[in-house]
Image (tube, grey):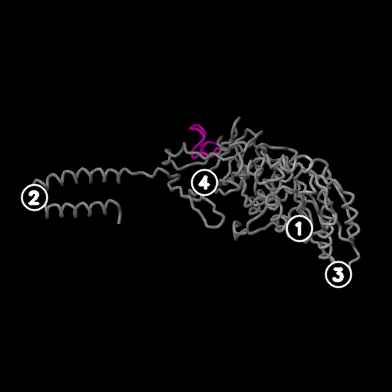
Amino acid sequence: MGCVDWFTKSTIRIFQLIFMHHGTKKRIGVCTLMACFLLLALMFIINQKPTNFVNGKERRIHQTNDNNIGVLTIPKREHKSVLCTSNLKSTVCEVQGDVQIQVNSSSINIYYATDDNMEEQASMSTRIKPYARNQTKLVNVTEVVIQNGRRSSKVGPGNPQWCAVNHTVPGIVFSLGMYVGNYYHEFSDVLLPLFLTSRQYDGEVRFLVTDTKSWFINKYRPMLNLMTNHDILDIDNDDRVHCFSHVIVGLYRHAEFGIIDSMVSPQSSYSMVDFGKLIRLAFSLKRETVITTPKSKQKPRLLIVSRTGTRKFLNLQEMIKVSENLGYAVTTSESPESLFEIAKLVNSFDVMLGVHGAGLTSMAFLPMNATVVQIVPWGGIESLARYCFKSATLEFGLRYREYIVGKNESSITEKFTEDDPVLKDPMSVHRQGFSVIRRTYLTQDIRIDVHKISVLLLDIFKTYQN
C-alpha cells in the first residue's frame, strides 16, 4: 500500500469516528484541528525528497560480521556508479561510467557523468587519499576528489575535447607517498595491496601513480611488469585529460602484511603463496621450495641478517661459530644494493635469522618451507613483532620461529638504571605511544645468549634432517 493510499483511508476513518461520537461544536473544532494536522502531513509526504541519494540510489552502509567492513554502495546503474569500501587498513573507491581524470596543482579530480535530470547532484564529491594505511594520518599523499558531474559546461561527453586519451582497460590510482622509502612498507603498503587490487585483471589494467618516485618504479619494475601489461602513468606530470570506463582509486589491503581469504572474491581467489610465486617469477628465482632428504649430506644454509645501525648483534662471530658447530653453512650479510642481488641471495637459503626490522621483509624471496627466525628485542614488543611478520611468514608457506631477547642480553641495561620505568615497567612506556617505544626499545643492541640460541637452531636443524 502506497503512502498516499494509506493516508486517504486513514483520513476517512478518522472523520467517521469523529462524527459518530461527538456533538456539532466539538465536531467542528476537532475537525478543524485534524484538517490542519492532516494537511501538514500530506504536504510532508508529497514534498519529501531523498536527501542522501546519488544517481537515484540511496547511500547505505553495510556492515558485515566478518572483518567489520563498511561498504558504501551507490549502484543505480552499473555503468554510472561509485562504490567505496573501507576497513581498518584502507579505503578504496571504484568509479564506473564516463570517467574523466584531470590533475591540477593541488589535487587529482575524477569526474563521472550523470544523467541529464540529475543536475542537483553535480556538486556532490568524495575525497580520498589513495594510500593503503587507514590508521595513520596520511602526509605527503595527494588527495583525489571524485565528483558526480561534468567538468564544465563547455567540455562534456559530446565534445571531442572531452578526452585527450581514451583507455580501453580499467585504471588504478595510487600514491607512492607516505612511508615509501621504508623497505617493509614498500611491500606491506604498496606492492601487496597493488597485487590484491590488480590481480583480477591479469595484466589488462593501467597504473596511474601520484607522488611518483622513479627509483621505486625502477626498483620494482620486474614485479610491476607482471601486474600490468601497460606503461605506468605519472599523473602528477601529465596534464592531459584521461578517460576510462572504470577507475579504482586506492589499493585494497586486508591485514598488516597478508591476505585474508574471506575478503577475496571467490571468482578471483588468490593468496600470499600466489604473491610469492609472482615474486619468484619476477626475479627469476630458481628455488620454489626447500627439499630435504633424511640422509642428505648438504648442510642447511643459514643467513644471519646483520645490521650496522641500531639492533645490531654485539657477538656476531660467536653466533656464527655456534651455528657452524651445529652443522649449518652460515653466511652473514647486510642487504646488497641491488634488489635482484638480494632476491637471489635470500632464495638460496633454508633459514633466515634477523632482528625485528625492515630487513626481515626479504623473507618474501625465500623458498617455501624455509624457516624465518625473528629475534625480538627486549621490552615487551613481542606482539608488535608478531603483528608485522608472523602471519606473513606462515602465509608465504614458510616456517616461523622466534627468539625473545632477555633483559641481560640487551644493551638497554647500560643506558638506564634498574629503577627507571624503561626497565622496571615497560608497559608504562608503551602507553606513551609508538614514537616513544621506537626510540626506547628499538634502538638497543643485542648480545645473544649463544647457549639459548643453539637450542633453537638445533631444533630447526633437526626438522630439515628428519
Could you tell me how far apart the alpha carbons at marks 4 and 1 are, in whole angstroms?
44 Å
Under mark 4, the amino acid is Val
Determine whether the residue tagged by mark 3 lies in a helix, strand or loop.
loop
Quarter placement of the N terminus: bottom left
Please identify, in this view, whether the residue under mark 2 or under mark 4 is nearer the observer: 2
Of the residues shown, which amino acid type is indicated by label 1? Arg
The residue indicated by pointer 2 is 23
Q: Disc 3 versus disc 2: distance between alpha carbons?
A: 105 Å
Q: Give the farthest residue toward the left.
A: 24
Q: Earlier in the sequence, mark 4 or mark 1?
A: 4
Of the image marks 2 and 1, the number of the one nearer the N terminus? 2
Which amino acid type is shown beneath numbered disc 3?
Pro
Tell me where residue 291 appears, x and y as whole percent: 82, 64
Question: Mark 4 against mark 1, which lies toward the viewer?
Answer: 1
Label 3 with label 2: CB-CB less than 8 Å: no
Q: Examine the image and state in which quarter residue 190 appears.
A: top right
| 388 relative position to 373: left or right | left
Q: Which residue is mark 4?
A: 82
For disc 1, the marked residue is 401
- Residue 126: percent from left, percent from top: 52, 40
Q: Which residue is mark 3?
A: 294
How crowded pointer 3 is (Cα within 10 Å; few <14, some 14-19, many 20+) is rated as: few
Mark 1 Cα shell of 10 Å, populated few (<14), some (14-19), many (≥20): some
CA separation in Å, label 2 and label 1: 90 Å
Q: Earlier in the sequence, mark 3 or mark 1?
A: 3
Q: Main secondary structure of the magenta part?
A: loop
Amino acid type of the residue tagged 2 in the rendering:
Gly
- Identify the residue at horizontal 48%, vertical 48% (top origin): 74
Where residue 235 sits: x, y (%)? 64, 37
Q: Residues within 10 Å of mark 2 (few under 14, many from 20)?
A: few
